[in-house]
Image: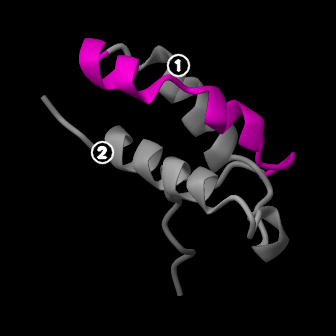
Amino acid sequence: MDPPARSMYYFRQRSGRLDWRRIGRVDLDRVVRTGDIAELQDVLDAAVFSDVDPRSFPLERSDLVARLVYILQLSRCRR
């Protein structure tokens, strides 16, 4: 039997907590208006590679959860 093919894709280790303050500070209007995604990319990297579990989401701050979802949506936009 042949060994499994090596994938070119790998999963990066997750670490740290979601930084909700950082997510809240992103100027989404400016990102959308200017198309400058440097700040967006920085926050996405921090969010995507954080160690997330159900306790990571602040129940009393649904506005921040909605903001994170919007940031993720913006990351999938194409020109």
Q: Where in the figure is residue 24, as x and y percent of width and height?
A: 64, 36
Residue 17: in magenta span? yes
Camera-side residue: 2 or 38?
Answer: 38
Count of labels in the image: 2
Q: Quarter of the image holding residue 51?
A: bottom right
Residue in the picture at 84% in, 49% down: 17
Residue in the picture at 59% in, 25% down: 42
Residue in the picture at 84% in, 48% down: 15
Residue that lies at the very extreme toward the left in this rendered image? 79
Q: Where in the figure is residue 68, as x and y percent of width and height?
A: 54, 49
Q: Where in the figure is residue 46, as x and y percent of width and height?
A: 68, 37
Residue occupied by mark 2 = 76
Q: Where in the figure is residue 41, as x and y percent of width and height?
A: 50, 27
Q: Quadrant of the C terminus?
A: top left
Using a 10 Å C-alpha cutoff, classify the residue at mark 1 as few (fewer than 14 neighbours), some (14 to 19) or many (20 or more). Answer: few
Q: Check disc 2 and give the amino acid type.
A: Arg
Left or right position of 46 against 1: right
- Label 1 sits on a secondary structure element that is helix
The magenta segment is: 14-35
Vertical comparison of 70 with 25: above or below: below
Using a 10 Å C-alpha cutoff, classify the residue at mark 2 as few (fewer than 14 neighbours), some (14 to 19) or many (20 or more). Answer: few
Residue in the picture at 80% in, 63% down: 56
Q: Earlier in the sequence, mark 2 or mark 1?
A: 1
Left or right position of 49 against 44: right
How has the structure been colored for display?
one colour
Residue occupied by mark 1 = 39
Left or right position of 46 against 71: right
